[in-house]
Image (cartoon, helix red, strand yellow):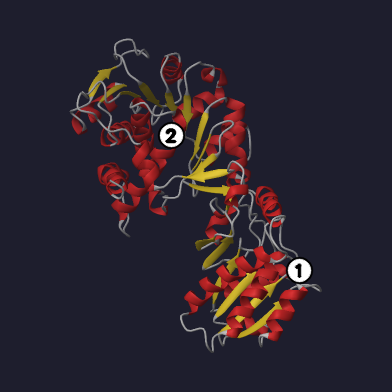
Amino acid sequence: MKTAYTADQIRQAEQALMARLPDGTLMQRAAAGLAAVCADLLGRVYGSRVVLLTGSGDNGGDALYAGQRLARRGARVGVVAAGSKTHEAGLRALLDAGGRVADRSAIDEADLIIDGLVGIGASGALREPYAELAQQAAAARGQVVAVDVPSGVDASTGRVEGAAVRARVTVTMGAYKTGLLVDPGAAHTGRVELVDIGLGPYLPDPDVAALTDADLDVLLPRPGNESDKYRRGVLGVAAGGDLFTGAAVLAVGGALRGGAGMVRYAGRPAPVAQVRSHWPESVVTELDEPSIARVGRVQAWVLGPGLGTDDWAHELAAEVLASDVPVLVDADALTLVARDRSLLWRNAPVLITPHAGELARLLRADRDAIEAARLAYARRAAAELGVTVLLKGSTTVVAEDARPVRVNPTGTSWLATGGTGDVLAGLAGALLAQGLSCYDAASCGAYLHGVAGRLAAEGAPLAAGDVATALPRAIRAVTSAIS
C-alpha cells in the first residue's frame, strides 16, 4: 500500500532522524536522489542547460546541492534566486562546482528546470516573485522537476490557490505527501519519484493511503470449493424508475460483472422489463408498492440509481434502510437522505457514493469548496453522518471516521460519462454482499472501476456499459499480476 503524510508528520519524522545523524546528511541524501532523477531525464548531462529556481528553505538547498552534482558532470547550471536569501552553503557548493547566478531569461533556454522555490510547509497562494517564476517555468520548453512538491501545491491537502508549478516529475523525499495524491495538486505533479532518505522508522500512521494491485489481490473475495451462489453473496438492487430505466440495468450489470453470486432486483414495471431483457440471470421482483417484503434475503443493498425522488421512492428507501444489512446509497437516494437525514439513523453499515454536488446538498456546503478540499469534506461527511464516504471525482477518495482516507490511483477521465457511477454502485454493492467492509468495498470498487475504465477506453470514447463489460478483465488484470 502506498502511504502519504502531512507536512507536519514529515517534519516531525525528519527532526527525529536528524537528531541521530551528522548535520547536512539528509540534505545530501535528498540531493543525490534528485540529481540522479534529473540526470536520467536529461540523458546526456554534459553540456545540458539546467536552471535552479530556489527560495530560502531546505528545498532550495536540495536543488542547489543537486545542481552542484550536475555541474560536476559538465552541465551548465544557473540559479535564479526568488528572494533576498538563499541556502548559503548550497549556493557556495554550486558556485565552487562551476555553477553561476542567472537571471530569469535563462529559464526560457533551459533543458531542465528544477523547482525548489518553496518547501512542504508552504500554504496558500504563492507570493511574488514566486508566482511569476512558477508561471514562467510552466511556459518554458524545458522539462520541470519539482523538489518534494510542486511550488503552489499544499503538501498536506493538495489545494492549489493561484499559480503553481506544473512538473514533468516530482522527486519527493522520504515519503509521499498527501497533496501529491489528491487533486487539484495531483494534476501538477507529473510522475512522482520517491527518494528514500531513511524516514521509514520515524513515520506515524499515514494521513492517506492508496491501494495497489497487491492489496487488491489480498482483499478481493474468491469462491472456495464449497461456494454456491448464496455463499458468494446475494445483492439486492433497488434502482431505476419510469424516467431512468437504464440506471437499473447498469447497476445490476456492475454487480453481476463484479462477482455477486446472485442479484435480486426490485423495481417498477418499466425498469423491470429492461433488467429482465438485459440480465436474465438476475432474480426480478416487480413492485406494485414500495415494499421489499417479497424480494427475499440479501447480504447487502444498492439503493438509488435512477430511483426518483417522489414519495414512492422515499418509502422504498425507508424500507431498504430499515433492513439489517449494509446499504450503499447512491444518486437519487442521496437526494432523499439529504432531505431526510433520519433515514441514515440505523445500526447496520452505510456506504454513500456522492459526487461533489450531491455531497454539497448533504452537508449544506458549497460545491466548489468541496472540489478544492476533497479530503476535508469527505472526512467531515464521514464523521457528521456516521457513514463511509466514497467521494467521486477527479480524485476519488474513501473516508471513514478514525481511519486513513484512501485515495484511488486508477481513475481516468474517460469515466466522465453518464451511467458509469451506476456501474460503480453495483460493483461496490457486490463486494459488500461478498463480505467486504464498506471501507474495503468502496476502495476496491473504485480501484477496479478505474482499471475497467482504462481497459474499456484504450484511448477512445466509451459508454458506461463498456465499463461493466470490462470488469472481469479488470479483476483478472489486478490478480494475475500477483498470482
- Percent of width and height locating residue 339: 56, 24
- 318 vs 94, left or right, is left
Which residue is at 58% across, 46% downward? 371
Quarter of the view holding residue 111:
bottom right
Which residue is at 29% across, 41% downward? 468
Q: Is residue 279 above or below residue 115?
A: above
Question: Alpha-carbon neighbours of circle 2 within 10 Å: few (<14), some, or many (≥20)?
Answer: many
- Percent of width and height locating residue 163: 65, 64
Which residue is at 70% across, 57% downward? 18
Nearest the camera: 444 or 44? 44
Q: Is residue 77 visible?
A: yes
- Percent of width and height locating residue 228: 21, 23
Nearest the camera: 129 or 248? 129
- 8 vs 464, left or right, is right
Label 1 vs label 2: CA separation?
A: 43 Å
* Secondary structure category for the residue under label 2: helix
The amino acid beneath tag 1 is Ser
Q: Which residue is mark 2?
A: 440
Q: How many marks?
A: 2
Question: Alpha-carbon neighbours of circle 1 within 10 Å: few (<14), some, or many (≥20)?
Answer: some
Q: Earlier in the sequence, mark 1 or mark 2?
A: 1
- Percent of width and height locating residue 161: 67, 56
Q: Which residue is mark 1?
A: 56
